[in-house]
Image: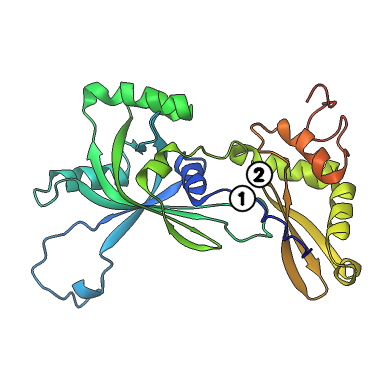
Amino acid sequence: MPPTTPPAPRRPTPAQWGRTLAVGTVAGTLHLPRLVRPCGHPRDPLGPSREARPRTQPHPVQHLTDAWGGLLLLVDDDSALHGHLEALTADARWNGVPVVLDVLDVPPGQAALPRARLSVTGWVESILPADQRRVAQTAAAVRPLGALLDVGTSRSVWRLEVADVRVTTAEGVHLVPDEEFTTAAPDPLYDDEDALVTRLETAHRDALVGWVLDTLPPHEAQQTREVAVVGVDRYGLDVLVTAGSGTKTLRASFTEPVHTPHDVVRALCGIFGCPCRATGLGEHTHEGA
């Protein structure tokens, strides 16, 4: 009987990565059409030609989602971004301001490259003043930012109508259908990932290194020099290993998806063989985790 191939480790889908980055844990960059300034000369001898100027202008932005998965922008009313949006909205050439929202994943520590990138193409539309507080409340139900309390006084929310969602991962660029994007659940550990990685590296260091040595082929295990957790998500851990002159990333899969940081305690038992009684990730026994 031929040997069976073990199933590939489960990882977040492109839609799940996109939704995780859409909720606003990591700030994004909004690319807007550049404002056209009156100019008497097509070429300025003191500066670059018009043809050499960038066609878009980037602004850092706090993006959010509403209760139905729609994308929102939270903008300070005295910011350059607000002035830019107002000017473009007043421009009769635009029926909705075309934009690209770019969000790059920020993994824990310095050892790993970004794991995903969200790129949303669409257009921004203003929200009526009478509806600002209501829309802010729907955003607060998903992510209760204190800044949402200022909507209607010193901040405003704008709606980003989505035309195209693309998520880039190590496997390539994925065009995510709208329904998949809006219905996917963000990763429940992403907000706490830095703290989880720190605790895994301290409270469970011996068990982690032991798992790596057991997982690697013997000749690579003998050459292992460094072991570092570089990611935690609902499906498992990513562990960066330096062995000899090369590096590789090992995937430690949980037996089932986790839903809270406390669930990680029990999930580690399935990977490391129960190293986690009353240490590190919280004072939890198996019964109390």
**Local SS, label 2:** loop
Q: Nearer the viewer, residue 111 or 234?
A: 234
What's under tag 1, amino acid-wise? Arg
First in sequence: mark 2 or mark 1? Answer: 1
Residue 182 lies in quadrant: top left
What's under tag 2, amino acid-wise? Tyr
At a point 88% along the width and 58% down the height, the residue shown is: 214
Marks 2 and 1 sit apart, C-alpha to C-alpha, by 6 Å
At a point 73% along the width and 66% down the height, the residue shown is: 248
Task: Quadrant for the N terminus, please.
Answer: bottom right
Q: Tell me, for residue 11, which label it has, or none.
A: 1
Does 169 appear above or below 42?
above
Q: Are marks 2 and 1 in contact (CB under 8 Å)?
A: yes
Task: Quadrant for the C terminus, please.
Answer: top right
Q: Nearer the viewer, residue 15 or 209?
A: 15
Does 286 appear above or below 187?
above
**Local SS, label 1:** loop
Tell whether 232 sits left or right of 127: right
Residue indicated by mark 2: 235
Tell whether 61 sits left or right of 43: right
